[in-house]
Image (cartoon, rainbow, N blue to C red):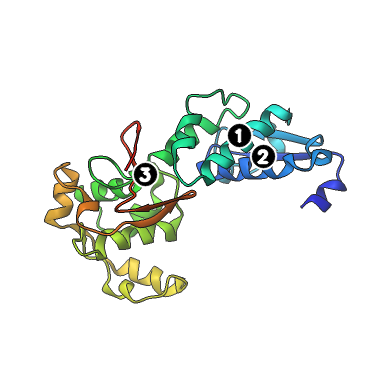
């Protein structure tokens, strides 16, 4: 990438509000910070709708902002915070001046909301899955792809599938009806996994209903073993979120 950028007089970075796009932006700017000869050529265009919705970029030009040390320093702080072994640094960033990258603060908040809830033990997307199933959405297509209905946008299709697997196939499942073949299929077997998700007809177990009613905590009955940035979440090291960060 550096070799390509050296051949250009200017390099424009276009990024939208999607939290994963903002993570890519701070990662790139942190990387370019160690190459000042490239940093001086950078321009940043922040798009207030997701890039996938733009059909003809040439007909719409958001303003280009030169990338200065202020943008680079903010990006480096955010990237190092996300990679840290606890979410504390990311939470602390919410109280700091992030105006150099104006789409970063809401992205960080969305990421933090995917930490397990202090009440239910589930992140925002997992909880939304249960709420949608409770309202009669039985098909995985609605859960995975109807983003405006789901209201979260951190994970991709197969990441959604892995979250649903854990909800349905743990020792105390919250979801019934997920195709049993998914227990044995390799994660890399995308073709067969898609067919298995399409065959599924989902419903809530009594335990799942209790979670939706905020009367049960998923993590007290099931193993937790996943990553949030550089934080390894386990049952005995479960950072939680309840509008504030809650230590294990």
Badge 1 crowding class, 10 Å Cα cut-off, few under 14, some 14 to 19, many 20 or more, is: some
In-front residue for pair 131/247 = 247
The mark lying in front, picked from 1 and 3, is: 3
Residue 64 can be seen, yes or no: no
The residue identified by callout 1 is 47
User: Left of 143 or right of it: where is 191?
Assistant: right
The residue identified by callout 3 is 115
Residue 14 is marked as 2
Residue 140 can be seen, yes or no: yes
Q: Is residue 101 above or below residue 205?
A: above
Labels 1 and 2: the sequence-earlier one:
2
Labels 1 and 3: the sequence-earlier one:
1
Identify the residue shown where x is 62% and y is 31%.
Answer: 74
Q: How many marks?
A: 3
Identify the residue shown where x is 77% and y is 36%.
Answer: 42
User: Left of 13 or right of it: where is 11?
Assistant: right
Corner quadrant of residue 173: bottom left
Corner quadrant of residue 186: bottom left
């Amino acid at each position: 990438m550096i070799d390509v950028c050296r051949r250009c007089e200017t390099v424009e970075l276009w990024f939208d509000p999607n939290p994963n796009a903002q993570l890519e932006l701070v990662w790139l700017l942190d990387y370019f910070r160690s190459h000042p000869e490239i940093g001086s050529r950078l321009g940043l265009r922040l798009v207030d709708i997701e890039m996938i919705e733009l059909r003809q970029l040439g007909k719409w030009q958001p303003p280009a902002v030169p990338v200065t040390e202020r943008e680079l320093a903010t990006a480096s702080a955010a990237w190092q915070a996300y990679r840290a072994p606890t979410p504390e640094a990311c939470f602390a960033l919410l109280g700091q001046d992030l105006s150099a990258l104006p789409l970063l603060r809401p992205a960080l908040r969305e990421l933090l909301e995917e930490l397990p809830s202090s009440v239910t033990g589930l992140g925002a997307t997992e909880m939304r899955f249960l709420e949608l199933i409770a309202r009669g959405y039985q098909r995985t297509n609605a859960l995975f792809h109807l983003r405006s209905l789901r209201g979260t946008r951190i994970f991709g299709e197969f990441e959604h599938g892995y979250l649903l697997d854990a909800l349905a196939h743990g020792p105390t499942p919250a979801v019934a009806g997920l195709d049993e073949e998914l227990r044995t299929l390799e994660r890399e077997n995308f073709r067969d996994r898609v067919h298995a998700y399409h065959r599924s007809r989902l419903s809530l177990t009594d335990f799942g209903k209790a979670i939706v009613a905020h009367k049960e905590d998923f993590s007290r009955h099931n193993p937790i073993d996943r990553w949030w940035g550089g934080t390894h979440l386990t049952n005995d090291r479960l950072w939680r979120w309840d509008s504030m960060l809650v230590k294990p």
